[in-house]
Image (cartoon, rainbow, N blue to C red):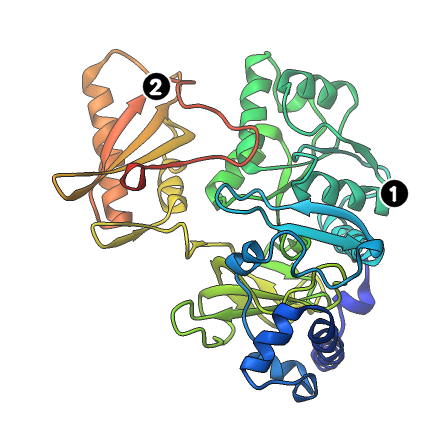
Amino acid sequence: MIWNPSKECMSRDEMHALQGRRLQKLVSYVYHNVPFYRNKMQQMDIAPDDIRSIDDIVKLPFTTKQDLRDNYPYGLQAAPQSEIVRVHASSGTTGNPTIVGYTRKDIAVWQEAMARALTAYGVKREDTFSVSYGYGLFTGGLGVHYGVENIGATVIPTSTGNTEKHVRLLRDLKITGIACTPSYALYLAETLEKMGLGKDDISLRVGAFGAEPWTENMRKEIEERLGLKGYNIYGLSEIVGPGVSYECCKQNGSHICEDHYYPEIINPETLEQLPYGQQGELVFTTLTKEGMPVLRYRTKDLCTLMDGECECGRKTVRMGRIMGRSDDMLIIRGINVFPSQVESVILEMPEIEPQYMLVVDRINNLDTLQIQVEVRRDFFSGDMGSMLAMKKRLSDKIKSVLSIGAEIKLMEPGSIERSQGKSKHVIDKRSL
């Protein structure tokens, strides 16, 4: 099913025309209401009248996370405070948080985007949906919550914490859908199994997973252990929250709500716009946002964009899987390393739990990488020969993927700290 065929299946010419009209209106709006953007545009000798179509977006300035922090708390807010009905904040750990204000219309657009996503996953009014993202300033919980209500399904606002109680609710309330981070889904599966239960004891059939990078192997692991179909959902608080893009039943990229959030891919070094199919940094412009609209926001997420009609019938541009971030990419001995690369290798080995930690250090002016992994209980033994063979296999696989060697440390089951929110997979001692 498709929630809004008039927009999700709109022809490319119609979509470009709509985006152009909305961009013209947006640029005029921020020029007259946000001194930061007015000053930027004046420095670049750009006036609102210079924007005549969506193709003119390349004339506009970029916005960065630092710009948002420098204008803390309300410097980028365009709507008067009397029209702001909600405020969220980013989950950043350094510097000022990113404060994002929403008008009533912004909330309605967000609900619309989430309804498109949930409908694409096959969620219906008859479903009972557990929202297991964190509530509060983080956008995940309330974002999905309002979307579920918008399509008429039943919301269970479980949030995170007390996972055993969550498992009992899954079983007793016959919950059919769940939204959470992929790492929490695996933690939930572990708890389910520790309680002596299995996927046949619960009724889950749909999972909406996001807020952190995850791999196809991790998807298969979650689907197998929880007995559901897992879908990707993408969003960020600076744009709106979850619902910016979503997978459909074909799972060939994530459909972007591009009538509201216009996507670009740029070269993160030269800042030039790149064509469809070429990997680069994802950039978004909020075409309809009133509270805190942003022009060409650099997400730091690395992916590709795909055009062309999807087999599901939607014609919106799709984004590929996030391959990492241009700002949290590890450079070890001159080699670019993404945690997702390590994860993909770990999940190919049935002896290893999908739990890991990368510890980066610098000893005698040489970068070192230690990869800590948990051995599954069935394979953990005192047989040194089998453990050393397992360690060597993993080491060889890691080196073939990363092009550098790493020290492999096999850990006992349950010894790596679990996360109920965004998982942490890197300890970089070089920057401590």
Residue 333: percent from left, percent from top: 20, 50
Tell me the amino acid under the disc marked 2. Phe
Q: Residue furthest left?
A: 364
Q: Nearer the viewer, residue 172 or 53?
A: 53
Please tell me in which quadrant of the rendered image residue 250 appears: bottom right
Q: Nearer the viewer, residue 327 or 122?
A: 327
Q: Residue at x 37, y 36 (%)?
A: 346
Q: Is residue 41 visible?
A: yes
Residue 164: percent from left, percent from top: 64, 16
Tell me the amino acid under the disc marked 1. Gly
Q: Residue at x 65, y 34 (%)?
A: 134
- Is the C-beta separation of discs 1 and 2 under 8 Å? no
* Horizontal side, residue 299 vs residue 262: left or right: left
Q: Circle 2 — which element?
A: loop
N-terminal-most mark, 1 or 2 = 1
- Which residue bears the numbered disc 1? 152
Q: Nearer the viewer, residue 336 or 100?
A: 100
For residue 88, above or below residue 375: below
Q: Residue at x 72, y 80 (%)?
A: 24
For residue 184, above or below residue 66: above
For residue 401, above or below residue 276: above
Please tell me in which quadrant of the rendered image residue 161 appears: top right
Residue neighbourhood size for the residue with mark 2, other residues' Cα within 10 Å, grouped as few (<14), some (14–19), many (≥20):
some
Q: Nearer the viewer, mark 1 or mark 2?
A: 1
- Which residue bears the numbered disc 2? 379
